[in-house]
Image: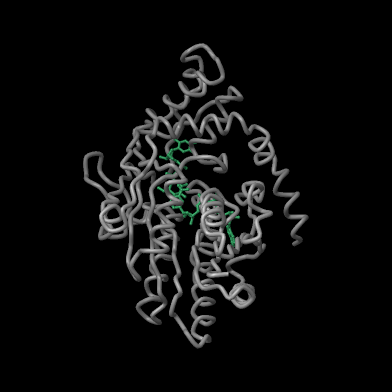
């Protein structure tokens, strides 16, 4: 194999799209998909690539330093794309310790495994890359009319989730500055598309509309997010992993800002149309509820550096992406039902032990 790439969090939402892209696009790479299979990780997301000769799966916890070193050695890992994390803001508000543990200590464990293993090889850091996948939430919140986040926007995280991601970003950069580890960091906006765990706004609401359940809009619904189709994120990661500069940061975004309430209305219209419901029939499900604590008002990413230097741009118009996404969830109701019931998780946990 030409390269041995470790993709952490590969059974999660974005990770599964990155694994699929790399397995299919690079048949001469061995792709090691590593995942602990938490509630958010699901090997069902990778059923279509699991038989490929260049794909292997390892069930492991990134916080387990000895296990990480063993995996680096077993597969002669020379590149890492690190996505494993606790990723849901609402959970971080209820359980901040788990976020600090996984996102900060887990990232540190992986960095230290990469450093010690790569430093022990004759070629050391030559041909190596540690790509850390982060979020725009580390930059804090923007005013309604307050410009966009750039790569030099100061960090100002507000939730335990974004604080843990900010901390992990600092560790990654510190490992470059202190030890010379060849790192690169990307900070991306909100992703949407197939295989997203239905705790996040878009799959949760599609499922609730289908089941005629309330759609809980936090606060006034005026918070703004910048949405990017998940496959476009995977393509951006591919570009940065292969061609991005060492120790650089690249913002990734959709140039696509939506107020939550407008997005929810678009979802309602799309789901109703595809289900053949009378127009507007699910509007009555929209329910304004108490706001999320520390709810960031607006995120918007300026990804012009990535466009200028690496030629990446989002490929999909939002309405097209939403249509594709809604269709996918409606056509894959078994996936949704099994994910929400935990049936898949139990099956794969039994298969991989622990
Ligand atoms: P996700 O929650 O769907 O997937 C996370 C994956 O990590 C799961 O498969 C889970 O089992 C695995 N994992 C969790 N703890 C682990 C551990 N200790 N060891 C090994 N594996 C573990 O998350 P996602 O939405 O796919 O996000 C992936 C990454 O991208 C995260 O780092 C997140 O911060 C970042 N990100 C997400 C978005 C977004 O909109 N979803 C946007 C920007 C950045
Ligand atoms: O910006 C990137 C981030 O996007 C990622 O780093 C996170 O991992 C990812 O979860 C996402 O965070 P958000 O908090 O923006 O996504 P979420 O889908 O949870 O919420 C989107 C918006 O919708 C947010 O303003 C909160 C609101 N919301 C969310 C839920 C789940 C509601 O109004 N009601 C809901 O039930």
Give percent across and percent down for residue 268.
Answer: 47, 23
Please tell me which residue is depicted at 50% across the width and 18% down the height of the picture.
273
Report whether 308 appears left or right of 47: left
Label count reads: 0
Q: Name the residue located 49 percent from the left edge and 79 percent from the top edge.
A: 115
Q: Residue furthest left?
A: 146
32 on left or right of 119: right
- Relative to 241, is 196 above or below? above
Whole-percent x and y of residue 275?
A: 56, 19
Looking at the image, which is closer to me, 311 or 37? Answer: 311
Closer-to-camera residue (299/114)? 114
Look at the picture and state if 326 lies above or below 255: above
Q: Is residue 303 above or below residue 73?
A: above
Of residues 10 and 49, which is closer to you in this image? Answer: 49
Q: Position of residue 229 (x, y in %)?
A: 43, 42
Is 52 left or right of 184, judged from the image as shown? right
Quarter placement of the C terminus:
bottom right
Q: In the rendered view of the protein, which quadrant contains the N terminus?
A: bottom right
Using the rendered view, name the quadrant where residue 191 is placed.
top left
Q: Residue at x 35, y 78 (%)?
A: 177
Colouring scheme, one of rainbow, by chain, secondary structure, one colour: one colour
Please determine whether, in this image, residue 49 is positioned above or below residue 181: above
Residue at 58%, 62% (x, y): give it.
31
Residue 296 is situated, as x and y percent measured from the top left of the image, at: 35, 45
State ligand 2's quadrant.
top left
């Amino acid at each position: 194999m030409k390269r041995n790439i470790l993709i952490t969090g590969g059974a999660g939402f974005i990770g599964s799209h990155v694994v699929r892209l790399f397995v299919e696009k690079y048949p001469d790479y061995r792709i090691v998909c590593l995942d602990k299979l938490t509630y958010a990780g699901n090997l069902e997301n990778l059923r279509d690539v699991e038989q490929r000769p260049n794909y292997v799966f390892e069930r492991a916890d990134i916080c387990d330093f000895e296990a990480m070193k063993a995996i680096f050695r077993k597969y002669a890992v020379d590149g890492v794309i690190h996505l494993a994390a606790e990723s849901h803001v609402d959970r971080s508000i209820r359980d901040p310790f788990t976020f600090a543990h996984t996102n900060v200590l887990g990232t540190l464990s992986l960095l230290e495994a990469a450093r010690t293993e790569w430093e022990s090889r004759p070629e050391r850091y030559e041909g190596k890359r540690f790509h850390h996948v982060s979020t725009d939430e580390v930059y804090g919140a923007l005013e309604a009319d307050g410009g966009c986040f750039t790569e030099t926007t100061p960090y100002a995280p507000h939730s335990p989730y974004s604080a843990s991601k900010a901390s992990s970003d600092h560790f990654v950069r510190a490992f470059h500055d202190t030890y010379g580890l060849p790192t690169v960091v990307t900070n991306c906006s909100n992703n949407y598309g197939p295989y997203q765990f239905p705790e996040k706004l878009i799959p949760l609401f599609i499922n609730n509309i289908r089941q005629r359940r309330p759609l809980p809009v936090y606060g006034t619904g005026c918070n703004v997010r910048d949405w990017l189709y998940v496959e476009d994120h995977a393509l951006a990661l591919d570009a940065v992993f292969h061609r991005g500069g060492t120790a650089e940061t690249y913002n990734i975004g959709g140039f696509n800002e939506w107020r939550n309430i407008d997005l929810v209305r678009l979802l309602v219209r799309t789901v109703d149309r595809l289900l053949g419901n009378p127009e507007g029939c699910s509007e009555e499900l929209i329910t304004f509820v108490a706001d999320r604590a520390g709810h960031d008002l607006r995120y918007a990413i300026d990804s012009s550096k990535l466009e200028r230097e690496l030629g990446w741009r989002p490929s999909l118009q939002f309405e097209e992406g939403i249509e594709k996404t809604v269709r996918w969830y409606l056509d894959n109701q078994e996936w949704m039902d099994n994910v929400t019931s935990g049936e898949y998780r139990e099956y794969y946990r039994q298969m991989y032990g622990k």
